[in-house]
Image: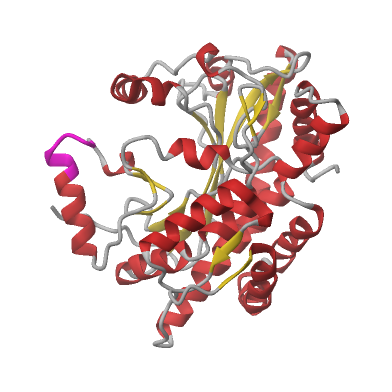
Amino acid sequence: MVLPFAPSRRSTIGIEWELALVDADTGDLRQVARTVLDALAGPGGEPHPHVHQELLLNTVEIVSGVHERVGDAGHDLRRSIDEVRAVTGPLRVELMCAGTHPFAQWDHQKVTDKERYNTLIDRTQWWGRQMLIYGVHVHVGIEDRAKVLPIMRAVLAYFGHLQALSASSPFWGGKDTGYASNRALMFQQLPTAGLPFRLEEWSDLERYTDDMLLTGVIDDFSEVRWDIRPSPRFGTLEVRICDGTPTLSELLAIAALTQCLVEHFSSELDAGRQLPDLPQWYLQENKWRSARYGMDAILILDASGHEDLVTTDVRRLLGVLEPVAERLGCTEELAGVAVILEGGASYQRQREVARLHNGDLQPVAFSLVEEMHAGRPLL
């Protein structure tokens, strides 16, 4: 089959942010997404352009428009959150984000009544019903289809860096999993989810898609749920690695890092230089290490097997990307990555709150609500 790649302006950015709807008094999840979406619909019932439904009725997705600068995408997100809060406030519902809710039970959640979601649950059964997870998707425009797969392979070499910085899912169903990102390993249980296959040419992606359609694995390319995937409809590379991010400042920092990585590798291709390309077995190991150890992960950095602490390599990477951030107008946002390095990732803050409250996870949920309001980490 032919898989067209839409025209896109180079290194433009769009952000998708999945948010949990939680009870203001208990911190548990509330199944009120339909009420929120109906209240935000237009006069003819048309959906809000920047607030979307998701798999579960405890979730709404906030999406930005397409922008040159990360900061402008952030303005979109702030505006949409204000609109959502105007509806949720009277319902005694708050917004919260993390890769997983600290104590909510998966079997208490309701699925959005839509054919696409019903089909997913019918096929995936127990694993599909357990997808009580939240993520961030960052789209970065790529102007030439021939660049998409080489850049995708290069960004995969920094999978562990992005996952460690965003890790925010240490708890599952009221228990500490021992992982920084339990979400990362849960989500890959779905068909077509997880690390992408190694694809050399666009024709390989077309062949894969054709095979998946032929055998009924997917009905549409959007059902390919890889951690990083081309998005042919938008003309972007969609980076889906990150756990749900509790604060806007951290979200924009990670989005800026993603945008800078894609632009940097695009420039390297223009200059005829070779891009990073790790063997699949190293990529798989880095995913596990960053999910397990987060900011303490020692990652495999190249095909020769050299290793270093993720925080050390992120600092090195920021030096490389500083001039890229200046070109893209996201220097301030990229500097937020250093703030995460100094203050710690969300999973570390959540565990500290739990420790201060003798293992009680309700204060963890409330701390995430407070951070969402503040727009920045509070520990």
Left or right position of 319 against 147:
right
Asked if residue 247 can be seen in this view, the reply is no
Relative vertical location of residue 173 with respect to residue 301 in this rendering, above or below: above
The front one of 192 and 93 is 192
Q: Is residue 185 magenta?
A: no
Residue located at (60% from left, 37% from top): 99
| Residue 84 visible here | yes
In which image quadrant can residue 172 be found?
Answer: top right
Q: Where does the magenta region start and end? A: 212-218
Q: Residue 340 at what x, y percent from top left?
A: 75, 55
Q: How many marks?
A: 0
Residue beneath the point at 86% across and 43% down: 379
x, y (%) of residue 332? 74, 64
In which quadrant of the rendered view does residue 147 lie? Answer: bottom left
Left or right: residue 126 compared with residue 207: right
Res. 303 image quadrant = bottom left
Where residue 75 appears, as percent x and y from the top left, is: 68, 48
Image x and y of residue 10, in percent:
46, 68
The residue lying toward the viewer, choosing from 173 and 17, is 173
Is 257 left, or right, of 107 in this rendering? right
